[in-house]
Amino acid sequence: METRELAYFAAVAEELHFGRAAERLGMAQPPLSRAIQKLERRLGVTLFDRSGRRISLTPAGEVLVREAAKVLDAVAAATVRTQRAGRAVPRLVVAMKAGGDGGLLPEILAAYRARPDAVEVDLVLCAVTERARMLRDGTADVAFLHSPYEDLTGFDSEPLREEGSVAIVRPGHRLATRPFVRLAEVEDDPTPCWPGRHSEVSDPSVLMQLVALGRLIAVAPESVRDQLRRDLVCVPVLDGPPTTVVLAWPEGVRSRALAAFVHTATMVAARHSTAANGDHLGKGAIEQLSGSLPPGIAVSRSMQTGVGRHAVERGGEGGVPGGAAHREPGGGDG
C-alpha cells in the first residue's frame, strides 16, 4: 500500500461520503472511487459497505482506519524530525507542563550544561494533553510524563522520581488543618480526574481556580507544592496512588543529543532518590550508550504565543552513537 492510498482511504472513512472526501482532497470523485476500489482489490477485502444510502465501514475497514492512522502519523512525524535534523543548529525540544518535572529540572539543566557537545535545548511549557501529542507528531523530542496517569504506549521511557499524593483544598475546607488524610475522606467532595485520564479539567490553572472557589478538591502528585498558589493548602494523602515522573521519547528513535539529556536526567534523579528506589533509577538502554555526551549553555526565557520557552544556547554537533540497543533514547536534532 502507498501512503497516498491510505490518505485517500482515511479521508473517505472520516467523511463517509465520496463526494465530500474528494472535495477535501482537492480531486474529482471518480478517480477517488477508483483508487479505493483498487485498494480493496489489492487487499482482497471490502472496506466500505455501499449497499445503503450512506456508506459505512466494514469490519476490515474499521481495522484499516486504525492502522492507517498510525502509518500516516508516523510518516508525518518522520518528515518533521528529518526536517529538524537538517537544521544548521541542532536543537532538542523538551515538553512539560508547569511543575511537571518533579522539581528536578533546574539541576538537570545545570548538569547538562557541563557536558561536552551539548546542543541547544528548547523547553516548551504546554497544556497537559499536548505533551504526548508533541512526541507523536515529531515537534518534541522528549517529554516529562506521569505514569500511570498518562499512556506510555509507543514511547520508551526512564523513571525519574516516584511521588506520593496530596489533596489540594482551600484554607476553609474541613480537611485543610489535618496533618494527613486518606482517600476515603475525600470521596464526599467533587474531584476531577487527574489530567490524562478523561479529566474534567485539563488546564491546571483552571483546576486550581475551581479549588480556590470551593467547587472541588484535587488529588495531585506531591511536587505540585512547588507551584501551588498561596491561597491553597496541600494535605498529604497517606493511601494516595503513587505517581512516577518519567522522561519519555518516541519508541525506537535514536539521537546522541537526547541520549545525553536523558542520561543526565537519570543521574540527577538517582542523586535525589531515596534508598528504597535509588538502585533502579537511571538504568536501561542509556547505560549502553558510549562516547562523550553533551555542552555548555546559557538559559534564556522568552514568550511565544503564550508558551514559555527556555533556550539553552550554545551549539555542538551530535550524532547517533554506536552500539546502542533497543531502548536507546533519541529523536532530537543531531
Image (spheres, rainbow, N blue to C red):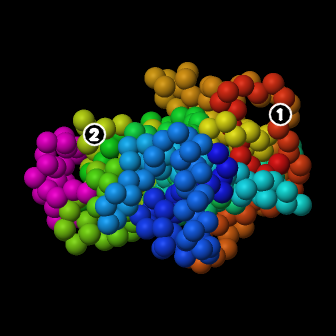
Indicate whether 324 appears above or below 213: above
Q: Secondary structure at mark 1?
A: loop
- Indicate the position of residue 96 as horizontal and vertical percent values: 55, 56
Q: Is residue 215 left or right of residue 30?
A: left
The quadrant where residue 309 appears: bottom right
Q: Secondary structure at mark 2?
A: loop
Q: Nearer the viewer, mark 1 or mark 2?
A: 1
Give the residue type that dot 1 points to. Pro
Taking the spot 38% from the left edge, 48% from the top edge, the residue there is 58
Per the image, the residue denoted by label 1 is 321
Name which of mark 1 and mark 2 comes first in the sequence.
2
- Indicate the position of residue 316 as horizontal and vertical percent values: 88, 51
Q: Which residues are magenta?
A: 170-192
**Numbered badge on residue 240:** 2
**Numbered badge on residue 184:** none
Indicate whether 272 appears above or below 141: above
Residue 328 or residue 31, whichever sits in front: 31
Residue 113 or residue 320, whichever sits in front: 320
The quadrant where residue 206 appears: bottom left
Q: Label 1 vs label 2: CA separation?
A: 41 Å
Taking the spot 39% from the left edge, 58% from the top edge, the residue there is 50
The quadrant where residue 26 appears: bottom right
- Indicate the position of residue 98 as horizontal and vertical percent values: 50, 60
